[in-house]
Image (cartoon, grey):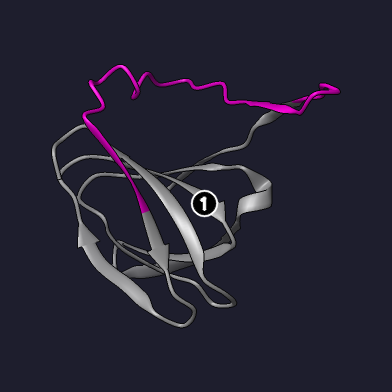
Amino acid sequence: MKIINPIKIKNYKGNIFKYSLKEIFFKKKIRDFYFTEIKKNFIKGWKLKDRETVLIVISGEVKIEIIEKNIRLIRLFKSKDKQIIIIPKKKKFRFSAPHKKSQLLSFLNEIY
């Protein structure tokens, strides 16, 4: 799992969050994006994609679990942190909202 933190550019009209990327995954013809609502204490998953999955928590808090080499990695992401989460291809993952209803934004370079 890769995490990309934003660079905050302060502006009196509203702050801008810039993401500097080492890899050019957005130029791989992103074909679809969607918003996912997750109700409190519900789990969505297990998912297994043939391509990288790019996620952004846009409201609330989302717990993401990923299995790598038979080890379960668990991490909580908050919308206020404005991070981009990249799940590698062929990794099982699921997500849940432990505290309140939350939302994720997902980008895919395939039609879902």
* Percent of width and height locating residue 17: 66, 28
Question: Which corner quadrant holds the C terminus?
Answer: top left
* Camera-side residue of 33 and 47: 33
Q: Is residue 112 magenta?
A: no
Q: Is residue 28 visible?
A: yes
Q: Amino acid at mark 1?
A: Val
Q: Nearer the viewer, residue 104 or 90?
A: 104
Disc 1 crowd rating (10 Å Cα; few below 14, some 14-19, many 20+) is: many
- The part of the chain drawn in magenta is 9-35
Which residue appears farthest toward the front when viewing the image? 13
Residue in the image at 20% along x and 40% along y: 51
Q: Main secondary structure of the magenta part?
A: loop
Q: Position of residue 102 (x, y in %)?
A: 51, 64
**Residue 36 found in image quarter:** bottom left
Question: Is 98 on the left or on the right of 110, as rendered?
Answer: right
Taking the image as shown, residue 37 lies to the left or right of residue 16, namely left
Q: Position of residue 111 (x, y in %)?
A: 13, 38
Check disc 1 and report the residue beneath it. Answer: 57
Q: Is residue 25 above or below residue 42?
A: above
In this rendering, position of residue 103 left or right of residue 50: right
Task: Classify 73 as above or below 33.
Answer: below
State yes or no: residue 12 in magenta: yes
Q: Is residue 16 left or right of residue 12?
A: left
What residue do we see at 57% from left, 25% from top? 19
In terms of depth relative to the viewer, which is nearer, 10 or 50?
Answer: 10
Q: Residue at x 23, y 21 (%)?
A: 29
Q: How many marks?
A: 1
Tell me if residue 75 can be seen: no
Task: Say which residue appears at 67% left-offset and 47% top-offset.
Answer: 81
Residue 70 pos. (x, y %): 29, 69
